[in-house]
Each structure stands twice: as C-alpha cells, then as structure tokens.
Amino acid sequence: MPKNKRKTLPDVEELMARPICYYCEKDFEDLSYLIDHQRAKHYKCDRCNRRLNTAGGLGVHMSQVHKEKLELVANALPGREKPDVEIFGMEGFPADLLAQHKSRVMQEFFKRESEHRAKTGNNPAGSKGDGEGIGKKIEDSKKAIAEFKARKAAAKAAAAANGSASGGSTPAQAANSPAPAQHFSPAQAHSSPPTAATEAGAQYAPSYPGVNAQYPAMQNTPAFNPYPHTVPYAGGPAMASGTSPPAPISSIPRPSSLPSAPGLPTAPGLPQRPAFDSPSFSKGDMARMHSGQAPPPGTSGSYHSGGSPPAAASYAPPYGAANPAYGMNNPPYGAPAPHWAMQQSPTGMPSGPAFSPSHGGPGPYAQPHDIKDQVDSMIESIISGNAARTPAAPSQPQAVPQQPPSNPPATETSTPAAEPSEAANSNKKNAKKENNTLLKYSDEQFSPEEKRAKKSWEPSQEWKDMMSNLDSTTSAALSKNSLTMVDQAGEESSAAVTGPVDDAMQNGDIPMD
Amino acid sequence: MSNPYELPDAPSDIISSVQFSPDGSRILVGSWDQRVSIYSKQDGGTFSLQHRFLSQAPVLHVCWDDQGKNIFWVGLDSDVRKLEVRDDSTSSQQVILSSHEEASNKVAFSAQHGILLSTSWDGTMHVHNPHTGAFVRIRLAAKPFALSLSSARAVVAMAERKVAVYDLIALKQLLEQNGGTTSDQTIHEVQPWQERESSLKFMTRAIECMPDGEGFATSSIEGRVGVEWFDPDFNNDNKYAFKCHRQTTKTVDQDGAEKDVDIVYPVNALAFHPVHGTFATGGGDGVVALWDAKTKRRVRQYQKLGASVAAMDFSPDGRSLVVGISPGFEDGSEDEEVDRSLIRVVVREFAEGEAKARAAK
C-alpha cells in the first residue's frame, strides 16, 4: 500500500514478491517480519509461551516439556492446521499453494486498479491521458521508470484479462462509469416522470423533483405534518380524501429533505432519492412495537396519512408504523428496497448487471447496499437486529404490497396478525447486539436444565421392566406415587427405610455389560 | 497414556454431574439418560465402567458420602435417592430419602456433619440424615440454581441474584430437633447465616467453596466468575469478578462492515484444586481454564474440548481432573436431540506442579 499518496501503487510484481504466511495467508513487508509473525502466532507454546521456530520444533517442545502432543497449529486457516508441514518463513511453502496465492494477488491487483480507474475516471496508467500529464509535470526520472513498469504490467495484465490492451473497455469500468442513460433501461420505464405521476406514481411520486412545487401546499394541510407528527392515525382516511392529485407527495417523510439531491449528478427524469431519517420513536415506543403492540397513535400512519390510497399502499409496509410489521423485522422493512433502488442516482448504483433490462423480476433490485446506506440512520435508532434482516428482504420483494394497492389507508389500522413471540425474540437479540456481545445462553429465570426438564420424560423401558419384575407392593415403594410405603416403614421404626422395603429394592442395581 | 484420556462407555445423554469418590479411585457420573454410572480405577491407572444404575428419571446431580460407600442422587422425579455401592454389584438398594414438590437439582453431602442437603426448583432445601432417613424441609428465598458446601457452611445460589449461606451446625441441630419424615409437611423458615446478593448480574450456573472454607466462587451464564469471601469485611476489600469463556469473532453486519462480536458462553462448572487452592472453570465453549484466586491470574488454559463442559471435579489428591462434556446446553438448543458422540467423560492428569499457582509477578 502506498504510504504516500503521490507514490504510484506498488506494482503487481512487488505485491507478488511479498512473503506470506502459510498458516494465515497474511503478507509481510519482509521475511523477518514474517518469521516474527509465525513465531508469535503459530509457533507459540500455549503452556509456557515459549516461541519456537517451526511446527516441528513446537511439537518436540510440547512432547518433551509438557508431555503433550501438538495436535494443531494455532490460528491457522482451516485445512492448514496440520503440524507435520514444516514451514519456516517461506521455506517449505507448497509450490502449488504459492502459485495459487500469486494468481489471486494478481487478480486482486487488477481488479483494484480497474476500480480505481473507474472511480477517478483516469485513463489506465500508460495510455494517453491524465496519468501521463502528471508524469510530465513531475519530471522525475524515477517516476517515469515506475510508470513504465506499471504500463508494462498493465498491458500484460490487460492482455491476459481480456485480450485487449485498452483499459477503457474493461468490463468493470464500463459498469461503473456514471452513465445516466443506462438507467433508462426498459425495466425501469415506470420510473420515468410521465408514467410515474399517473400509474406508478403511487410508488415514486413522493420523491419526484417535479412535484416540489406542491410541497408548500402540503404543509398547509395539518394532515401532512412531516414525519414525526402527532396527529392520530385515525385522521388518515379523511386526509386522503382531502388530497387529490398531488396527494402522493404528502407521503414524503420530511419535506425539508425533499428538494435535496446532494452531491449527486442529476440524471434528468430520474426521481430523486427519497430522503428519510430515522423515525423518531422513543425507546419506549420501539420496545412496544417490538413486542408486537401497536405503535403510539402519533406515529401510526405517519407515512401514509395523507397519501392517496396507492401511495399509502406502497409506503405503508416499509414504515409499518401502523402495523406491527415495523417492529418485527419482517420483509416490509426491507421491502421498499426495490423502489428506492430505482430512485438511486446513477452513481449510487452498484455495478451494472442489476440494471440490465433482462431482469424484469425482483432480481434487479436485489442490491441492498445502497438502500442500506440510506436507511443507516434509521437502522441505528432501531436496534440492529432489525436491520440484520434487511438484506434478506429484497429477496422477497413481492411482500411489498402486503395491502393491495386498492386498499384505503384506513384498513391498515387493522394490524396484520402480529407475531409477538418473534418480536420478543428479536428484541432479545437486539439487546445483546447493542453492546456487541452475544450471550450463548440468556434466560435469566430458567436454567438450561430446567428448560430441558420441561420436555416430558417417562421412566425408561428398563425401569418399567424392573418394576414389573418386582411384585406390586414393592414396586410401589419405588415409584413416586406411593411414597407412603416408605413413610410407613419410616414410622414403624425410627430408621426411615428399613425392613421390607429394603429387601424389596434389591435388584435396584442394574449391572450393565 | 495420552492426556487427557477419555473414559470408555460414556453415558448416552447429557452429563449432569461428575464426582470423584473420597479416595479418588472411582468416578461417579450422573446423566440425563436416567443413569448413574461408577467408573473405577484399574491397575493401569485408567478408569473403566464398574456399575451403572438405573434411576426413574433423568439424573441432575450426584454425590458420594464420606466413606465412598453410598451414593446419592437427585433428578427430575423430585426424589432424593440413596444407594449403597457394593463391590459385588449384586445387592445394592435404592432408597428414597425424601421427595421434593418439583424436580430436585442439586445434592451435597457434608462429611464433617454427616448430613445431606438437596435443593429443588420448588424453592425448598431438604436436610437429611442419610442414616436414619429423617429430614427437614427448609424454605429458600428463591429458586435455587447451585449448591456447594464447605466444612462449615452451605452456600445456595438462587434466582434474583440471591445467595444464602447457611451454617451447617445450625442445620444439623434443626434436623435433630425437628427431623421428621414425609408425613411432617412443615416447611421451616430458617434465617440463613448470611444473605447476600450475588456479585454476578446474570444467572448463577455453578458455585464452589474454597477448600480452606474461607470463601467461594460463583459463575454465571454470562461468561463471568466471581470470587467472594465469607468474612464480610475481608470480602468488601477483596471480592472480585472476571470475564472468561468468551470468544471474539468477526461478523459482517448489515452494512457489510466487519464487527467484533463477543460470544459469551456460560460457565457451567467450577472446581477448586484441593491442594493448591487454584480453581478450574469449564465453559460452554468447551474450554477448561485454571485460575489462581489469590493472585487473580490465569494459570493455564487447555485446548478446546469437543463440546460444552457440563461438569468437573478434581480428584482428592489434586492429581487429576474429571470433565464431563456434553453438547446442547451452551447455545439454547436444549430441546434438540443430542449428538451422542460428543458426550464424553475425560480425565486430565496433571504433571507435578502444573495446577499450582505461579508466583505473582
């Protein structure tokens, strides 16, 4: 890695020449570091902390000093823990593994290079362009040599990678270059302005730049309080009726963030990012929602309240404020992903394939990363367990219209069947994750034994056989239900259990084998 | 002899407790397959199965009497059972000493006072005279989780972080005055010698008194061990708790960022070394570690065993440690069928001075 930004990246040969550790594949600046690493991480005796030079040495030490056999080399990657491979520094490194490693390093190097190029828009080192300009500016012969080297390497690599020496056409670059046009692929036709306002508008209208104008009006309507509003949800339907055509906007989470598309190249016709912030639920609200209860009135319907029915439908599930789904990590939370993904500005889009027209189904949207960025703040305030499920959600986007679009918002007040148990579960997990610890066992009231004891048990067959071999009175003495037998015996004589009972309980010992 | 070595004929279900006999020649093992097993030492120094007794229900705890002649066990059938162990293994007799209202989870015998204590999830403790069969019921403040005896005290760790220390002499006197049988249903309210709050915030898994009788160690489900002393003044200055049996792993959170997550295992077993005063902890991670209570240092940590450490006991001479290993309890999968191959009883022999505390730096 370059320590100095102005230095050129280490070339691929340098990278490949770095010594690596056989056991953990970590690479080092130089051989002596590697040897130190191996002594500290892999050849240290866990009994006396003595550091040996090789696995064999450690084995001998263990057997002689501690009388134990070295079974595994510590901290080794799976499959490499065998102590019988003698490795010292790079000595003894199996050739095939080394070759594998080198090819991997090479791949990574070129991948990074192309990514870097795509990001910066620089021409590949060696071709005419910025890179050369810089090289000229800094008339440093050493640099020139380094560049020459890099050029050679790049050419070689490019030839190896796709047979073409021009880096500009590497697939990665093509995919990453900000080309707005790409995003008008047929699959997204519905995200183009005209249609959005009419049919699909229900889904996309909220963040339409074009509708900004209607935004003030919205504010006048009490119903359209920005997100953390306190109007009880019951007002929802009424509002919906009050808002005709431009209504969809009303479901914008926070008006203030509406017009902003900070730092993103404006792709004409593409909707802006929906801006939302974390819903400002209090901790208590959160807890309630997690436990499957309805959220406080103020929050319910916050997102759909003013929305025309379709809009509400498309947003309702994600915010789920009105339905417990919100607190339950159910798909709804992540479900809106597809829509948001569509609204991503081009730069936000991960590599192209997701947008290829051929993907008509949910597939194209299965790109949770961008959405995640946006929801991050939300995720933080909600407990992380929730979010953990987010990635899974896009895989089932069909869950989005949990309420059919035709449903008036009012119906959403009737909460879909809650699953309190799951909610409670996730709650527990969340609490654990918050401080980054995970209790393997966390029940405070019941010990594991007691939990297991709740499983019904029956006297085993052997026990029953044993009982049936004894005559009835004596077996009674042994069985729980007629303890009185023992008691009577106890009352008869001061020694609690003697006499007949004792005799009867011969055979209590079942010799095995 | 490889070290540690595994005993043959391991039980077929989760091991609940293991204990060395007072002379160290036999190992008693209780398990959920409703059996109590006795392994005895052979000429070669290895242990092999000598007896296996059938009980009515899964066995939760076992113990020896002071002579190694009788064994006691408790289990899900709520009964406290006694059995005389004879070498010829033909004529042993199971006797029910008492019955709790619910399953009984712990039993312990005081050699000094000749009394047997058993606790149950119904929130009672029974004090028995195992010879006469007389016993008294004592109400506990909460549901008991663990029980341990020193020469003079009995320590019961309970729910709600309650810990009660009873004086064994007082318990014996109570037994002598009121010792009745099952017909006497009175549950005595006894003021413990000491009432404490556990130094651990989470549920207690195990408790063990120091061999010198000065204090005790407790362990919780949250990978933590506390060491306390009976003397209140000394305790205030010296008690401590430390974390153990944890594992830091990297997980990828929803942002794709790597995060360190501390996986915390319950500490299921504690055992004090009878000679050196060090103690061993066994956790759900399958690790056994040796600690020095005085210098507060880890003496040793042994390689991972295949599954959760369920129970441990040092031999009376301190030369070996028996460890019961069973899967299941450590990760909340109590309901699932257990993998029998993971259920093992291993004995680790210590080299000279291996379990000894190293000098403080």
Image (cartoon, coloured by chain):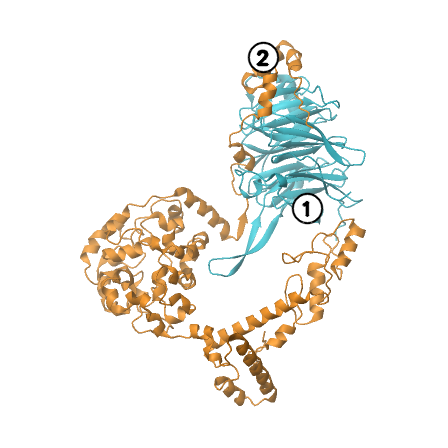
Which kind of residue does numbered mark 2 sit on? Thr
Viewer-side residue, B235 vs B278? B278
Viewer-side residue, B361 vs A368? A368
Expressed as whole percent of the image width and height from the top left, the position of residue A132 reads: 51, 87
Point out the residue furthest to the front here. A163
Expressed as whole percent of the image width and height from the top left, the position of residue A393 reads: 40, 55
Residue B295 is left or right of residue A228, and the answer is right
Image quarter where the N terminus of chain B lies is: top right
Chain B's colour? cyan
Relative height, residue B150 to residue B260 (above, below): above
Residue A61 is left or right of residue A464, and the answer is right
Residue located beneath label 2 in the image: A473
Task: Please tell me which residue is depicted at 80% across the width and 36% down the height of the picture.
Answer: B44
Residue A421 is left or right of residue A26, and the answer is left
Expressed as whole percent of the image width and height from the top left, the position of residue A321 reads: 33, 51
Q: CA distance from mark 2 to mark 1?
A: 50 Å
Residue located beneath label 1 in the image: B289
Task: Please tell me which residue is depicted at 36% across the width and 56% down the height of the picture.
Answer: A397
